[in-house]
Image (cartoon, helix red, strand yellow):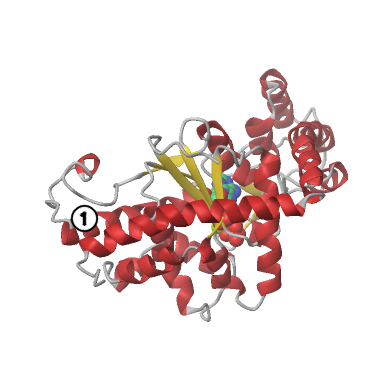
Amino acid sequence: MNTNTTQQRVLTGDTPTGRLHLGHWVGSLENRLQMQTEYDCFFLIANVQAFTTRADQPTEVHQSVIEIALDYLAAGIDPKKSTIFIQSEIPAIAELTVFFSMLIPYPRVMRNPTIKDEIRDKGLGENYPFGFLLYPISQAADILTFRPALVPVGEDQLPHIELTREVARRFNQMYCHVDPHTEDADYLKQGGLFPILEGKLGRLRRLVGIGGPGPDGNLLKMSKSLNNAIFLSDDPDTIKKKVMAMYTDPSRLKATDKGHIENNPLWIFHETFNKDVAWVAAAKQRYQAGTIGDVECKQRLIEVLVELIEPIRQRRLQYEQDLHYVNAVLRDGTARANEVANHTLQLAKEAMRQRYF
Ligand code: ATP
Ligand code: MG
């Protein structure tokens, strides 16, 4: 376990609504693996957030917490360097959520494009719970509790990061008497408790899914909840079936038709994951000219994805044999996270003049 407190902190996390997929890999995991040597990293499994859409599936959420922990370890997150922990076991986050919810006007919470997209794309209709609207504030608490310098995330999280920055500015102005004209970078120097932190995007801001466009005609993001993901735990056979069935260019009916590259997941995936840049460039031209078939391009993609995913899957199989170890990682990580979280809560209560005893 990392005890180096002089390192800057990183905080990010995942909702246990399934297993991790290629979107997580390019959107955030690659960054986390790089950062874990330089930063004191905290990776949160957001099980309370999973209840915003799955309150009726507690057993699945529990199982998914373990799945995400397995995915982390298999992907190379090292518990000697990084702290992996469970959101609901950190009471300070819940307490700060309540205080933070007083700092942001209700219409501001509703003006969040990611919330609107999720309601539409996940088909939540009008009957989503009140707690669903609260989750961006709860996420601000997840983040600020750890007072990180950086938060590695995919593009869909940027509106939440912006809200987190607003919460931090308001708290610092209201309770730490930081001048509202202060530059974001200077808030801590001016006596603020919470940093005005930055989101750090991965090399791809948003990986599309394999299932084609959503209700608004645009390609949907790859998402655990949308049944359009290739998981880091998929075996070669599953990867093959998924790639063979994936959405490509609907106007191309046979291999001799001229194909489109834009908005075509086949080529987005090759560009993102295929290291053979020369092959990709040549094959793209042939695809547009109608001289290469989808099947050949898909077979190449299957090879590329199996090469990336298979070592991760093999490590995962090992960890699946040792769930006691996984449990110990979560327990120790959660204990360490509580130390940091309780310290922040004390400081926050002091700033808010709400420490009585
Ligand atoms: P859900 O469907 O339940 O919302 P998800 O697949 O969107 O799940 P999250 O747990 O919400 O996954 O996201 C965890 C992190 O991974 C976030 O930082 C998010 O931005 C990033 N991420 C998720 N999907 C993608 C994607 N397709 N491309 C890039 N980043 C992604
Ligand atoms: Mg999501």
Q: Position of residue 5 (x, y in %)?
A: 40, 39
Could you tell me which residue is drawn at 62 percent across and 41 percent down?
Answer: 25
Q: Residue furthest top?
A: 278
The reply to whether residue 222 is in sight is no
Expressed as whole percent of the image width and height from the top left, the position of residue 227 reads: 70, 59
Task: Name the foreground residue: 12 vs 259.
Answer: 12
User: Looking at the image, which is closer to me, 213 or 249?
Assistant: 213
Residue to which mark 1 is pinned: 172
> x, y (%) of residue 266?
71, 39
At a point 48% along the width and 53% down the height, the residue shown is: 337
Q: Quadrant of the C terminus?
A: bottom left
Image vertical order of residue 278 relative to residue 59, above or below = above
Left or right, 110 with respect to 173, comes to right
* Residue 157 appears left or right of 182: right
The reply to whether residue 146 is in sight is yes
When asked about the image quadrant of residue 301, the answer is top right
Query: Looking at the image, which is closer to me, 37 or 28?
Result: 37
- 99 sits to left or right of 315: left
Disc 1 residue type (three-letter): Asn
Q: Secondary structure at mark 1?
A: helix
Q: Is residue 347 above or below residue 53?
A: above
Q: Quadrant of residue 259?
A: top right
Q: Position of residue 201 (x, y in %)?
A: 47, 40
Compared with residue 333, is residue 141 higher up or lower down, i.e. above or below?
Answer: below
Name above or below for residue 222 compared with residue 87: above
The residue depicted at 72 percent of the width and 45 percent of the height is 232
